[in-house]
Image: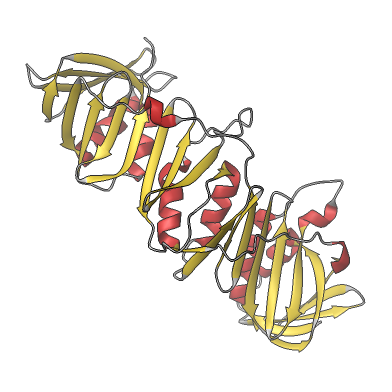
C-alpha cells in the first residue's frame, strides 16, 4: 500500500472514526481503524461491533493495499503536524510508515485480515432524505432519552412514519419530545426503528455538515445511513417503544402564551436559585393576570419573576424540574411559546406544530 492525500481531510475523518472504535481489552483490533487504498480513494473503516463507519477520501494511490492501525495513535500524530499540507502513507513490513516534508513516522499495525467485517443493510427499499432534516429530527429529541441502559427501549430514539411525516420521539419517562419532518421521498415506506441513544449521537457527529441527501435502509436488526462517500450502520433495539400517544394530553385546564426569550431568561435566572432537584414553582392566575416563577434554595436564596403572558383557563400552581423545561428551548424556534397545563405540561412554539414537548410535574 502506498498513497498520498491531504492531511487535514485525513485528520478530520480519523478523528470521527476514532469515536466509533471500541475499547475492548480482549479484542484490541477494535481500537484500530482499517485503511483500504483502492481505485484512487482511501476508505477508512471503524467499528465497536455496535456501530460501523466507512468514509471514503480521494487519494493518489501508487500501490493498493490495506492495514489496520490504532486510531488514537494515528489521530494524535496527525493532530501534531500542523504545518503540513499532505502526507504519504506506505505499508512497510506490515507497519504503516507516514512521511511529510518535515517528519517520518512508523506506527506498528494490525493485520487487515483481523479487522471485523462491517455489516450493511443493502436492499432496494432505501429512502432518500435531506440530511439536515434527519439531523434536526434527531437533535430535537435526543436530550429526552433516558441515559440508563436498564430499559433499552427508552434509552433510544424511536423513528417511524406517520402519513407523509417522519416522527422522532424520545422519553425518559419524566419528559417526552416529539419532532416531525415532512417526507419528500414517497417512493417507499419507512420501517420503524429504535436507535440506541449513543448511536444517535454518533450519527449526528458523522453527518454534521453533510449537504447531500442521505439514503436510509432498515431491517429488524440494523439501520444503515449512507451518502456517496459515507456509510454508517447501527444496531437497533429489538423491542417496543412505549405507546406514548396515550399520555399526550388532549384537553387542558390552563394555557399561557408568552415570549420565548423572556421565558428562557426567567427560567435560567430561577434555576440559579433552585434546589438540588432543580425545582421551580409556576403560579398562574388568569383572573389576576399573573404568571410567576419562584425558586428557593436554603443555601443560596430565593427568586421570584413575573412575566407578561396571555392567560386562559383555571388558576394553578405546579412545580417542575427547571432543567427539563430549559432543555426544550433548543428545539423551539418560534418567537412565542405556548404552555398548556393539565397534569403534564405541554410546550410548543406558536405556529409550529412540528415539535411538542411534555414535562411531568414534580410531586411537592
Image vertical order of residue 254 relative to residue 10, above or below: above
Quick one: which residue is furthest to the top in this view? Answer: 364
| Residue at 82% over, 62% down | 115
Assign the C terminus to one quadrant of the image. top left
Front residue (pair 222, 114): 222
Image vertical order of residue 192 relative to residue 278, above or below: below
Image vertical order of residue 278 relative to residue 103, above or below: above
Image vertical order of residue 131 relative to residue 151, above or below: below
Left or right, 109 with respect to 359, comes to: right
The image quadrant of residue 148 is top right
- Where is residue 66? Give x, y as percent: 81, 75
Left or right, 107 with respect to 350, comes to: right
| Residue at 71% over, 60% down | 46
Q: Is residue 87 visible?
A: yes
| Residue at 82% over, 71% down | 67
The image quadrant of residue 74 is bottom right
- Where is residue 137? Give x, y as percent: 42, 50
- Where is residue 33? Give x, y as percent: 75, 63
Left or right, 63 with respect to 193, comes to: right
- Where is residue 13? Give x, y as percent: 62, 67
The image quadrant of residue 300 is top left
Assign the N terminus to one quadrant of the image. bottom right
Amino acid at each position: 500500500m502506498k498513497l498520498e492525500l491531504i492531511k487535514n481531510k485525513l485528520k478530520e475523518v480519523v478523528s470521527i472514526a476514532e469515536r466509533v472504535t471500541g475499547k475492548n481489552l480482549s479484542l484490541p483490533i477494535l481500537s484500530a481503524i482499517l485503511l483500504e487504498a483502492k481505485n484512487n480513494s482511501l476508505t477508512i473503516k471503524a467499528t465497536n461491533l455496535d456501530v460501523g463507519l466507512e468514509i471514503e477520501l480521494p487519494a493518489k494511490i501508487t500501490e493498493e493495499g490495506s492495514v489496520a492501525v490504532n486510531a488514537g495513535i494515528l489521530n494524535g500524530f496527525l493532530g501534531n503536524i500542523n504545518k503540513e499540507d499532505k502526507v504519504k502513507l506506505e505499508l512497510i513490513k506490515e507497519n504503516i510508515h507516514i512521511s511529510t516534508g518535515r517528519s517520518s513516522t512508523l506506527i506498528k499495525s494490525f493485520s487487515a485480515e483481523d479487522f471485523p467485517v462491517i455489516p450493511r443493510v443493502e436492499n432496494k427499499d432505501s429512502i432518500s432524505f435531506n440530511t439536515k432534516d434527519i439531523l434536526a429530527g434527531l437533535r430535537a429529541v435526543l436530550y429526552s432519552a433516558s441515559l440508563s441502559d436498564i430499559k433499552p427501549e427508552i434509552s433510544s430514539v424511536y423513528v417511524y412514519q406517520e402519513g407523509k411525516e417522519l416522527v422522532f420521539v424520545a422519553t425518559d419517562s419524566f419528559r417526552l419530545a416529539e419532532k416531525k419532518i415532512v417526507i419528500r421521498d414517497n417512493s417507499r415506506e419507512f420501517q420503524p426503528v429504535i436507535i440506541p441513544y449513543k448511536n444517535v449521537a454518533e450519527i449526528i457527529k458523522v453527518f454534521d455538515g453533510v449537504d447531500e441527501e442521505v439514503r436510509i435502509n432498515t431491517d429488524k436488526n440494523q439501520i444503515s445511513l449512507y451518502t456517496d462517500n459515507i456509510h454508517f450502520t447501527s444496531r437497533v433495539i429489538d423491542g417496543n417503544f412505549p405507546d406514548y400517544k396515550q399520555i399526550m394530553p388532549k384537553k387542558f385546564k390552563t394555557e399561557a402564551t408568552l415570549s420565548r426569550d423572556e421565558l428562557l431568561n426567567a427560567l435560567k435566572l430561577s434555576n440559579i436559585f433552585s434546589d438540588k432537584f432543580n425545582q421551580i414553582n409556576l403560579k398562574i392566575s388568569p383572573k389576576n393576570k399573573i404568571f410567576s416563577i419562584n425558586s428557593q434554595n436554603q443555601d443560596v436564596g430565593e427568586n421570584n419573576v413575573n412575566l407578561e403572558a396571555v392567560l386562559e383557563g383555571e388558576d394553578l400552581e405546579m412545580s417542575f424540574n427547571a432543567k427539563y423545561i430549559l432543555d426544550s428551548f433548543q428545539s423551539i424556534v418560534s418567537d412565542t411559546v405556548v404552555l398548556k397545563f393539565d397534569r403534564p405540561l405541554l410546550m410548543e412554539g406558536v405556529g409550529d406544530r412540528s415539535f411538542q414537548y411534555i414535562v411531568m410535574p414534580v410531586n411537592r
